[in-house]
Amino acid sequence: MSSTTVVPNIFKREFTKFAWSTAVNLQELNRSEGGIVMAVFEMESWRVKEGKEEEHKKALRGWLQWVNDHRELFKEWKSVRYFVKTIAGEESDRHFIIWEYESLSAFEAYKTRRADYKGPYAEYKKNDPYHMGVFDHSSMSVEVWKDVDRDLWIE
């Protein structure tokens, strides 16, 4: 049975909770000799702060463009995708960003390097909508997923 532990800030925001045993299992798979390296997906979701819809839209587009213009800072990111739930009952209008990493070690390397927003990541923080007052922080959630049977995916 896995226990839930508060994860160090390198894994995203202070409020993040994560099934730590899952991360340890992923880490062992990624680091074991002859083990299969599996992609890791970090999913962050939130609701837009009431009355901030236009500012939110502008902030997200600006952040995505800034990240595209500075890809050298995010070499561990295989992909970044942005979604909004549209037909989901009470969950409609919930926003999601999904980051794809090659492995848990790539995820950890990026989070460690960016941890205190030093150097070029100070500019990243200025462009991060999380710090712009457009998210309802009480609605935020972070999850980390691993891929399964990717050789059978249709892409």
Image (cartoon, helix red, strand yellow):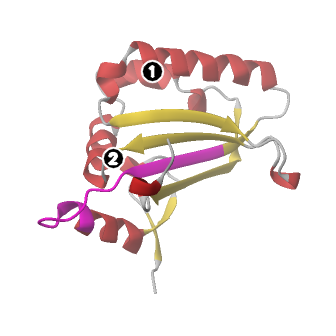
Q: Quadrant of residue 149?
A: bottom left
According to the image, label 2 marks what residue? 107
Residue lying at the far right of the rendered structure: 89
| Identity of the residue drawn at 49% across and 51% down | 14
Secondary structure found at label 2: helix
Image location (x, y in percent) of residue 77: 37, 35
Q: Is residue 40 magenta?
A: yes
Residue contact at pointers 2 and 1, CB within 8 angstroms = no
Position of 94 relative to 82 (above/below): below
Secondary structure found at label 1: helix
According to the image, label 1 marks what residue? 67
| Identity of the residue drawn at 14% across and 65% down | 34
89 sits left or right of 14 in the view = right
**Residue 70 visible from this viewpoint:** yes
Position of 39 relative to 75 (above/below): below
Residue lying at the far top of the rendered structure: 69
Q: Is residue 10 magenta?
A: no
Nearer to me, 33 or 129: 33
Span of residues in magenta: 29-45
Number of numbered labels in the structure image: 2
Image location (x, y in percent) of residue 46: 68, 44
Q: What type is the residue that disc 2 sits on?
A: Phe
Mark 2–mark 1 Cα distance, whole angstroms, equals 17 Å
Image location (x, y in percent) of residue 113: 27, 37
Q: What type is the residue that disc 1 sits on?
A: Val
Position of 72 relative to 29 (above/below): above
Q: How dense is the environment of label 1, judged by Cα within 10 Å: few (below 14), some, or many (20 and up)?
A: some
Image location (x, y in percent) of residue 103: 30, 51
Please report whichever mark, 2 or 1, sits nearer to the chain's N-terminal start: 1
**Residue 120 visible from this viewpoint:** no
